[in-house]
Image: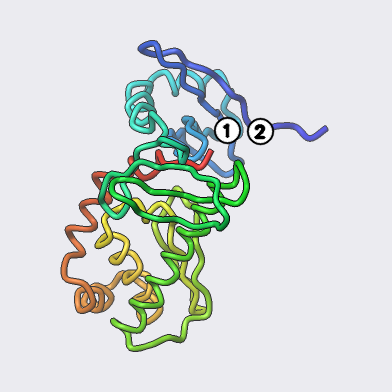
Amino acid sequence: MKKTNHQIKYILYKNVSITVKIKKFKYSRNYKVTYDKKDLQALVSIPNYITYQNGYKFALENIDWIYNQHIEMFPSILIDNGSKINIFGFKKTIKFKIDKTNKVEFKNNNIIISSLEKNKHSSVFYDWIKSEIIDLTKKILLEKFNDNNIKKIRISNSFNYWGSCNTKDSISIDWRLIFAPKNVLRYIIIHELCHLTVFNHSSKFWKLVDSKVSDRKKSQNWLRVNANYLYRIRFN
């Protein structure tokens, strides 16, 4: 049986139970604590020769920071019937409906998600989100870059970055950005498309971005302030 390199501990702090994963890393030299926004738990990284008990003590020494990170991720915002959610910067109520076709409609203050099958509404909505982001990316590419030659637009589920690109004319955009104001989504798309020309964050890159979008600092600030709101949004 393969030997595990981590232990799971639970800390009750201010009446909140917090999961802490203590993990050993072969080449690590220092203690480090982070918060895993995907699995909603603290991660304590320790050198291979340090005991799990010492890792646990380190977590206790940093429990205030861990607690503050933890409570910012709750409550989760589920894509579910009756849930209230911001989309394109406007608050809407999600309504599930059984219908003859799969579709997403905006009516008054509601998002009507129609599905042919029961319990498939989330899939219908996710497909719609992907389609919206891909269509917007293609539109921006043509309007802002006078180009329609991009090999791949991927929809990501990252908890570390909002967008990414590679040297093969492929970009990735996080699906949660559909729940940000539209100017924020547009900024991230433009940011990644600019990377296809300048593959770094040099002054040349930022000059190119600013030539395509006028409010990037406003969008960057919105993401700094509201990142955890977006990360709280879950399909399950």
Viewer-proximal residue among 69 and 62: 69
Helix, strand or loop status at disc 1: strand
Residue most extreme to the bottom: 146
Which residue is under mark 2? 5
The image shows residue 231 at horizontal and vertical percentages of: 40, 43
Which residue is under mark 1? 23
Relative vertical location of residue 128 with respect to residue 1 in this rendering, above or below: below
Tell me where residue 62 sits by quadrant: top left
Amino acid type assigned to the residue bearing label 2 in the image? Asn
Viewer-proximal residue among 106 and 162: 106
In the image: residue 4, left or right of residue 228? right
Residue 229 visible to an observer of this rendering: yes
Relative vertical location of residue 222 with respect to residue 53 in this rendering, above or below: below
N-terminal label among 2 and 1? 2
Relative vertical location of residue 151 with respect to residue 87 in this rendering, above or below: below
- The quadrant of the rendering that contains the N terminus is top right
Viewer-proximal residue among 87 and 98: 98
Within 10 Å of disc 1 (Cα), the crowding (few <14, some 14-19, many 20+) is: some
Helix, strand or loop status at disc 2: loop
The image shows residue 13 at horizontal and vertical percentages of: 39, 13
Between marks 2 and 1, how big is the CA–CA gap? 6 Å
- Tell me if label 2 and label 1 are in contact, CB under 8 Å: yes
How are the residues colored?
A: rainbow
Please tell me the numbered disc located at residue 4.
none
Residue 228 visible to an observer of this rendering: no
